[in-house]
Image (tube, rainbow, N blue to C red):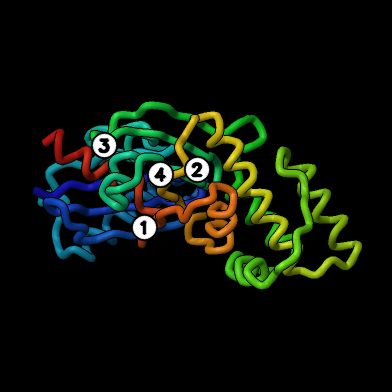
Amino acid sequence: MITAGIDMGLRSIKAVLLKDDNIIASGTVASEGFNRGQAAEKLWNEVLGQAGISASDVDIVISTGTGKEDVSFAANNVVEPVADVEGARKMCPDARTLIDIGAEQVRVVKYDENGKAANYTLNQMCGAGLGIFVESMARQLGVTLDELNELAMKSSGVEPINAECGNFAALDVTTMIHNNTPKEDIARAIVDAVATKVKSTANLTNIDNDNIALIGGIARNKSIVEALNRQFGVKCMVPDQPEMAGAYGAAVIGQDEV
């Protein structure tokens, strides 16, 4: 049995091809605004080529993500929290809470060993767009996301900025730049603010600070992962491809629909 999952995010589109329980192909492509459907088809053809199969060899395609309705070749779609849980369960079997930090949303889901959600929180009013916020702050510092991560890892100081509102946080960063605060300390302040905001969202879900899996593209940022570890007082689990969790979960769900 071969199933596919397509995760249509705001910034990127992810695809996973699953044969039984093994990923045989995966890929990602930048989302193209109003042409997201075309971008999904392009990625679809790429992963099919990667696996050396044709579309007719795939038993079912399930889409998820904010643009899930744009995948014309999907047989069905599933809401993001459900796909996230299935992906996290496969990638981090010991996890009982997932935190998905994407470009446009933060999702926290607490679930049992069977994948049934016990509690769920979508970002608070000013918690949306943390991924976009980090990108914006990196541009303000004149560095790439990788460079921001490296700078934050070098800092030992603590320069707090507003963690409740992205606009106020941006003003704080501007002030720090004008005050000639070292870049590494500004970078550390940015990632700490992100971690503080995520923790406040997680608090609404009444999670236990154990067995937490971090998924979504931001989970590739080691400095943010370390900041979250400090916030929760535990070492959070991060799968090898955290950004693929939603697509992986959608493909897993497809196995039950064939």
Q: Are marks 4 and 1 in contact (CB under 8 Å)?
A: no
Is residue 70 something one can see in this rendering? no
Q: Which comes sooner in the sequence, label 3 or label 1?
A: 3
- In this view, the mark in front (4 or 2): 4
Q: Position of residue 140 (x, y in %)?
A: 75, 60
According to the image, label 2 marks what residue? Answer: 34
Gap in angstroms between the C-alphas marked 1 and 2: 31 Å
Which tag is nearer the camera, tag 1 or tag 2? 1
Secondary structure at numbered mark 4: strand
Q: Of the residues under marks 4 and 1, which one precedes in the sequence? A: 4
Q: Earlier in the sequence, mark 1 or mark 2?
A: 2
Q: Secondary structure at mark 2?
A: helix
Which kind of residue does numbered mark 3 sit on?
Glu
Q: Vertical placement of 108 versus 52: above or below?
A: above
Q: Which residue is mark 4?
A: 8
Q: Report the residue that reaches farthest toward the right.
A: 179
Determine the CA span between mark 4 and mark 3. 27 Å
Label 3: which residue?
113
The image quadrant of residue 63 is: top left
Q: Residue furthest top?
A: 118
The amino acid at mark 2 is Phe
Q: Residue at coordinates 26% horizontally, 49% vertically from top-left?
A: 90
Q: Nearer the viewer, mark 3 or mark 2?
A: 3
Q: Residue at x 84, y 56 (%)?
A: 174
Residue 173 in view here: yes
Q: Residue at x 34, y 55 (%)?
A: 42
Residue that label 1 marks: 239
